[in-house]
Amino acid sequence: MFAVHQLAHAYDGKDVLRVDDWQAEQGAQWLMLGPSGSGKTTLLHVLAGILRPASGQVTVANQDLMALSPSALDRFRGKHVGIVLQRLHLIDSLTVMNNLLLAQYLAGEPQDVARVREVLASLDLADKGSARPHELSHGQAQRVAVARAVVNKPKLLLADEPTSNLDDTRCLQVLDLLLAQATACGATLVIATHDQRIKSRVPNHHELAVPK
């Protein structure tokens, strides 16, 4: 489903990411583990096509991301990749419904109200379509971010530290939510985390080290 080979990236002349090889099959569930500074967020951004690495190869759903123009990459990401960032980036001037409809529009997909309602209902948000993000609890806003990530039925679902700063009960609820939504879409799931509480719940682990 995705493959990376000989990836490297640097900021201000300092190496922040090095990955020799990593491949994942469609529908597989992975944790990306590593200490702070190992490049977990950077690698998520590379897989999402948000960031072009300094060198290396990145293939997602049989598409070489490095071969796409910026506009084509935006369309590809919108259609095939869902991502839940640490900062949720919901648009506060739009309702929950319109945040999800916008995600469909930006991906070049038909604006499908029935699909939006289906996703919101699956996340226990059926009554929040007309709410604005600032009217939601943090947990509800996080579920809206997940809904936005999966509304286009992505092939790859990425999440950046989704359980950080959560108590044990909420941590497992968020993990179960991501696993269930990835399964419902048939998506490959990659969770970047340093949270040791969830290691036993996800079968595949990819360890990153701080570049030397």
Image (tube, rainbow, N blue to C red):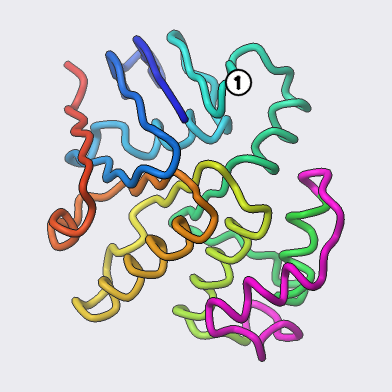
Q: Is residue 206 magenta?
A: no
When asked about the image quadrant of residue 20, the answer is: top left
In the rendered structure, the answer to whether residue 198 lies left or right of residue 191 reads left
Query: Which image quarter: residue 98?
Result: bottom right
Residue nearest the viewer, comparing 179 with 171: 179
Q: What residue type is labelled 1?
A: Gln
The residue closer to the viewer here, 186 or 72, is 186
Which residue appears at 57% of the width and 33% of the height? 50
User: Residue visible at 40% across and 69% down?
Assistant: 177
Image position, residue 29 (x, y; %): 33, 47
- Position above or below: 96 against 27: below
Q: Residue 75: percent from the left, percent from the top?
A: 75, 35
Drawn side of residue 164 relative to residue 89, left or right: left
Relative height, residue 10 to residue 125 (above, below): above
The number of numbered discs placed on residues in the rendered structure image is 1
Q: Residue at x 82, y 49 (%)?
A: 109
Which image quarter holds the C terminus?
top left
Which percent across, then down, holds residue 202? 23, 53
- Residue 129 located within the stretch drawn in magenta: yes
Q: In the rendered view, would you say 152 is above or below 24? A: below
Say left or right for 24 vs 31: right
State the extent of the magenta-drawn residues as a range.
106-134
Between 48 and 203, which is closer to the camera in this rendering? 203
| Label 1 SS | strand
Q: Is residue 33 left or right of residue 55?
A: left
Residue receiving disc 1 = 63
